[in-house]
Amino acid sequence: MNKNTYHLVTLGCQMNKADSERLASYLDQAGYIETKQPETAHLVIFVTCGIRQSAEDRVYGRVNQLRKKNPQALIVITGCLAYRPDVKRRLKGQVDLFMNINYLPRLVELLAAKNNPDKVDVGKFYEAERQENGEEYLKIPARYESTYRAYVPIGNGCNNFCSYCVVPYARGREVYRPASEILDEVKKLLKMGYKEINLIAQNVNSYHSLDYDFPRLLKEVADFPGTFWVRFSSSHPKDLSLDLIKVIATSEKVVNHLHLAVQSGDDEILKAMNRKYTVAHFKDLISRLRAARPEIAITTDVIVGFPGESEAQFNNTLKLFTELNFDLAYISRYSPRPGTASWKMVDSVSSLEKKRRENILNAHLIATSLAANQEKVGKELIVLVDGQNKSGLYYGKSADYRTVFFEALSKKTNLIGSFVSVLIKEARPFGLNGVLSEDSKVSV
């Protein structure tokens, strides 16, 4: 085994992917060499997700499997499971180091001291230090996985404390990067030819740095010269301002897509979730967004089977789906998370009932998504190409976040990372099929 090799296992959200890009950069600078074979790596780091039990169970399985195949490996857990005492107990003897991602600048020191816990404190989370000095690990330059799409973290942590969510405990309170630092990173990416900039945080709408708020930051990024798109996530409805809606409406480079998690269509459930907005407020936001930019696609997140959710309350969510006709929705069954407020609530909705409610919403979503996609038939969409499937079809995302498949002009053509114009020929519930437009100008 080469003692300078490492392997990263990244699970979960866009923020975890961005964290892994900084982890890779840090380890490269520290003299480690990346390997694609975890079975032979000296150091294996799991960037974990604990948003649902299924994601947590995946970590247990992967760690136990790796320990059998590579007993000499140094195994590190970071991400959302790193702080959990119950996870530490379950993986005792299997994992060498549990590390909050905020400790990344000290990783080499922590690895050296892993057998001498008195030498360095790895258990305490210095929240005051983060608040005073900012999120130091975000200053580490990323080693971007993609050559055309970049995730740019603008901050880390969350102050919202939704009753079902582990993020505030896993990542701490909100800390934001200076605007100058973010803008410099974006400038460098655009000079390198990147086609899509994704500004990300647990709640981008809360961003603030000196006299910058998120609408100003977003506008300045969108005002940079060049041919590129700007996306952002995650957005919390309680902080989506009229100023932000104006920027979305007037900045051409800001894509015509917004992901805005509603989570429930019932006010009592929203209150129990500690979401701090009402259904009426959410509907008003969607109305304003569609009035300001009529072609905008709205996607959302919904949890079914939250503790105490009655049939009538679930039907209010179904009613909201009917009224708002989301372009796409990520529907999940409630999963109790240790340490959260809802962990103490009675998980009163059975697994079978959660599945039934999920199926009802999915059936409705299939119909509304298909209808929305059918409106695109006969139109040309600009697509940023992501890859090619086994059948030889290219695929990518349109600005409104629709997945588009199309044939290449020739087998020699390599369109990955390019903007192309695609004439839509066929609609499916969650995708579109088309052909390259005859006058398509490929932007590489």
Image (cartoon, grey):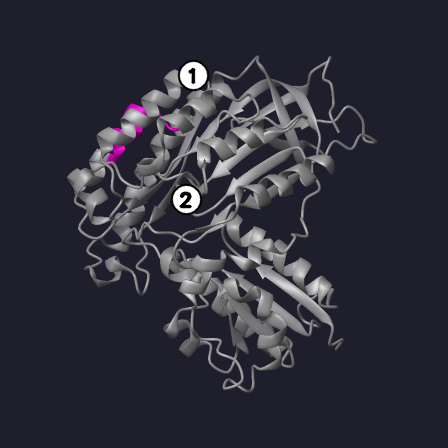
What residue sits 65% from the left and 53% below the top?
141
Q: Name the mark on residue 203.
A: 2
In the image, residue 319 lies in the stretch drawn in magenta: yes
In this rendering, the label closer to the viewer, 2 or 1: 2
- Helix, strand or loop for disc 2: loop
Question: Can I make out residue 49 in this image?
Answer: no
Residue 15 or residue 323, whichever sits in front? 15
Left or right, 260 with reference to 193: left
Q: Quadrant of residue 76?
A: bottom right
Image position, residue 73 (x, y; %): 64, 77
Residue type pointed to by label 2 = Asn
Count of numbered circles on the image: 2
| Highlighted range, magenta | 317-327
**Distance between mark 2 and mark 1 Cα atoms:** 24 Å
Which corner quadrant holds the N terminus? bottom right
Image position, residue 144 (x, y; %): 67, 48
In the image, residue 343 lies in the stretch drawn in magenta: no
Residue 247 or residue 393, whichever sits in front? 247
Residue type pointed to by label 1 = Pro
Examine the residues drawn in magenta and state their main secondary structure.
helix
**Label 2 environment density (alpha carbons within 10 Å; few <14, some 14–19, many ≥20):** many
Q: Name the mark on residue 294.
A: 1
**Label 1 environment density (alpha carbons within 10 Å; few <14, some 14–19, many ≥20):** few
Left or right, 249 with reference to 71: left
